Amino acid sequence: MKPQKSNRVKKTLAILLVFAFLIPATAMAVSSTTDINNYNVSVIDTATNKVTATVPVGERPYGVAINPTGTKVYVTNLYSNTVSVIDTATNNVTATVNVGGESAGIAVTPDGTKVYVTNLYSNTVSVIDTCKNTVVARVPVGINPSGVAVNLKGTKVYVTNPSSNTVSVIDTATNNVTATVKIGSGPDGVAVTPDGTRVYVANSWDNNVSVIDTCTNKVIATVNVGRSPEGVAFNPTGTKVYVTNALDDTVSVINTTKNKVIATVKVGSAPFGVTVNQKGTKVYVANQYINTVSVFDTCTNKVIATVNVGTYPYGVAINPTGTKVYVTNLEDTVILVG
C-alpha cells in the first residue's frame, strides 16, 4: 500500500488499509490459496435489485458517472491514474484514458461532451473530451481534490479540496478557476441544486454540510448531520438532499427549504456513495464495510432492499432511465483454492 499524503486520503482509504491485511491473513488459513485482485464495477438491475453484470476496470475503481444518454459509464481508477469508459450496451470497456495522479471524483457535463476528473496527488482536474477520449485540459485547484459536480447548465464545475478546506469553482468556457470558497474541514462529497443556485458540500471532519450561494460564492448555511459525512445527492426537484454518514451508518435527509435534517435513515456499515432515481422515489447507498447497496423508499425513509455487490463499494450512479445502477468496488478479491 503506498503512503498517503493527506488526512482525507487516509480516511477515505482507511478501509483498504484494514482489509488489505485481513483478506490475505484469512487466505493463509487455507492451503494452496492464491489471491487475485479483480477490480470491477457491479451493474444492478433496479427492477429486480440483482447484480446482472460485473465489468472489470482499472486498479481501485473509485468514482463513477454516466453520460446524459445513458450509453457510457465513466469510472476513475484510483491507482491506475486512468478513467475506464464502459459501453452500457455491451458492458465492455471501450477506452481507457490516462489522467492525473490518483484519479478520484468524476462528473459528466449535461451535454455529455466533457468529463471532469479530480486528481488527488497532482492537485488538478483533468478535462476529457468524450469524442476523442483524450485529456484536453488540466486545471490547477486546491490540495488533494476529491469531489466534483457540474451544474445543469454546464457552465460551472465545483471541486472539493479536502486538504485546503476549500471548494474551487471552474468556468467551463475557459477551464479556469474563477473563485475559491472557504468552507469546513475535510470537504468531500459535493452536489449542485437542480436550479444551480446552491451547492451542498459534506465536511467530513466537521460532521456538517456547507451550503454555498452560487451567485456570491459565500457559505449561507451550515447543517449538522452525522459523523463523517461523505456522499451528497439531490432528489430531482431539489427539495431534499441525501448525505451519507460513514461513521454512523446512516443517511441524513435534509429539507433544502429550511436547511434542516428531517429524517435519519439507518443503512449498512460505512455508507459512502449515494444516488437518487429520476422519480425521486428511491435512494441507493453503497455500504463499504459489508459489500452491499441499500435501497430505501423516500416516502417512508425505510430500507426496502439490500443488494450484494463487490468488495468495498464506493461510488454509485444511476442511469437516466432509472433501470440500472453502477457501483464501483474498490477491491474485489477472488480466492482460488487448489
Image: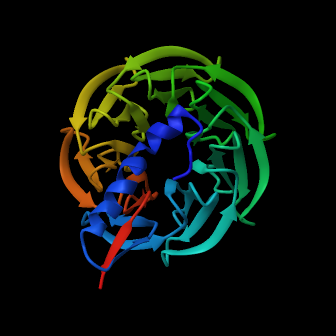
State the residue at coordinates (51%, 28%): 186
In x, y percent, where is residue 70?
Answer: 51, 63
Q: Decide if residue 309 is in sight here.
A: no
Which residue is depicted at the point 49% across and 79% down? 90
Q: Is residue 111 shown above or below 256?
A: below
Q: Quadrant of residue 312?
A: bottom left
| 2 with respect to 50 (left or right) | right
Seen at 79% across and 49% down, the residue is: 137
Measured along the vertical axis of the image, is residue 44 above or below residue 117? below
* Rendering coords of residue 296 (x, y %): 24, 46
Q: Position of residue 2 (x, y in %)?
A: 56, 50
Report which quarter residue 232 is drawn in.
top left
120, 47: nearer the viewer: 120
Q: Is residue 216 above or below residue 108?
A: above
Please tell me which residue lies in front, 280 or 272.
Answer: 272
In the rendered image, the vertical position of residue 118 relative to residue 213, given as above or below: below
